[in-house]
Amino acid sequence: MRSRRSLPSPQEALRILSEKRTRPQRRPPPSAGRGLGKLVKDLDARFGQGAGALQARWREVVGAEVAKRTEPVKLVKGRNGGPSSLEIRVAGPSAAIIQHQAHEILARVNLFLGPEAVQKLRIVQGPLRNAPDPPQPRKRSQPLDAAAEAKLAEGLAEAPDGKLKQALMALGRGVLRNSR
């Protein structure tokens, strides 16, 4: 018959536990979608013609006038072969103008992404993230001093009066102001 082993004392139990190495609890691997999502986005950015490429080349695709009023938000693929749509954000009151140009925008986007890549255009009004800077007020230039104005008038004294002489005077003033 075996002899019964006695339980360790609390101090012995602490010593045994401090000397023992425990393994961390095993975690399940991440889902394939999580791991592949980042890879697909990177490949799309480098080689693809997806939404990332469309956003990067939006100005080229739709033209400068449309691009300063809009920006692509997302490209939604249709389910079960349904129509895919492109959502664009439009700055304020320009939505009506963009709505009238929807067919042209779709044609240009499909030319870039491939035939029938996008069938619908969804327009959402809102502020643009990459809004162009508002135009800066022009600095008022200082008028020419009397001596420079007289020298310019003397140089154009023989020119006949009219629009040409006025244009030459304005040009001369601009050149003299910028040369200071």
Image (tube, grey):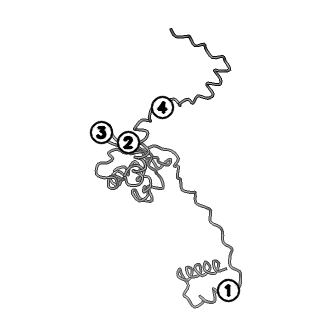
Q: Are marks 2 and 3 in contact (CB under 8 Å)?
A: no
The local secondary structure at tag 4 comes to loop
Q: Are marks 4 and 2 in contact (CB under 8 Å)?
A: no
Name the residue furthest right. Answer: 146
Where is mark 1, residue-wise? 150
Query: For residue 120, which quarter of the picture?
Result: top left
- Foreground of the two, 173 or 81: 81
Where is mark 2, residue-wise? 76
Where is mark 4, residue-wise? 27
Query: For residue 61, which quarter of the picture?
Result: bottom left
Q: Is residue 154 above or below residue 96?
A: below
Nearest-to-viewer mark from 4 and 3: 4
Residue found at x 62% / y 65%: 138
Mark 1 or mark 2: name the one nearer the start of the chain: 2
Residue found at x 55% / y 88%: 159
Mark 4 or mark 3: name the one nearer the start of the chain: 4
Query: For residue 7, which quarter of the picture?
Result: top right
The amino acid sitting under disc 2 is: Val
Q: CA distance from mark 4 to mark 3?
A: 39 Å
Nearest-to-viewer mark from 4 and 2: 4
The amino acid sitting under disc 3 is: Gly
74 left or right of 142 in image: left
Position in image of residue 80 (x %, y %): 29, 36
- Foreground of the two, 12 or 37: 12
Q: CA distance from mark 4 to mark 2?
A: 34 Å
Name the residue furthest front. Answer: 1
Mark 4 or mark 2: name the one nearer the start of the chain: 4
Residue found at x 41% / y 53%: 53
Where is mark 3, residue-wise? 82
The amino acid sitting under disc 4 is: Arg
The local secondary structure at tag 2 comes to strand
The local secondary structure at tag 3 comes to loop
